[in-house]
Image: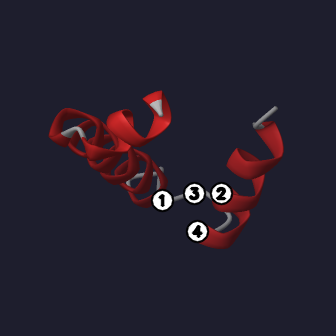
Amino acid sequence: MAMRAILKEAFFWRFAGGFAIGAIGLLILQPANAAGLVDNLASVLHALP
């Protein structure tokens, strides 16, 4: 029941959306000498627990 209430909160969706946009921005704004977006994404996903 509590999870359903959390999913209906506008603040939760703003936070999740901002987090996703920030993560995408970090991937896109990597230095020019980075190997590429796919490699960066793979390294970020590998670092997750």
- Callouts 1 and 4 close, C-beta under 8 Å: no
Q: Nearer the viewer, mark 3 or mark 4?
A: 4
Q: Which quadrant is the C terminus positioned in?
A: top right
Q: Position of residue 15 (x, y in %)?
A: 28, 36
Q: CA distance from mark 2 to mark 3?
A: 11 Å
Q: Which residue is at a point 34% across and 35% down the rendered structure image?
A: 5
Q: Is residue 49 left or right of residue 11?
A: right
Q: Which residue is at a point 74% across and 50% down the rendered structure image?
A: 45
Q: Which residue is mark 3?
A: 33
- Callouts 2 and 3 close, C-beta under 8 Å: no
Foreground of the two, 46 or 33 = 46
Q: Which mark is residue 37?
A: 4
Q: Which mark is residue 32?
A: 1
Q: Quadrant of residue 4?
A: top left
Foreground of the two, 44 or 32 = 44
Q: CA distance from mark 1 to mark 4?
A: 10 Å
Tell me the amino acid under the disc marked 2. Answer: Asn
Which class describes the residues within 10 Å of circle 1: few (<14), some (14-19), or many (20+)?
A: few
Tell me the amino acid under the disc marked 3. Answer: Asn
Q: Nearer the viewer, mark 1 or mark 4?
A: 4
Q: Which residue is mark 2?
A: 40
Q: Which residue is at a point 27% across and 45% down the rendered structure image?
A: 8
- Callouts 4 and 2 close, C-beta under 8 Å: yes
Which class describes the residues within 10 Å of circle 2: few (<14), some (14-19), or many (20+)?
A: some
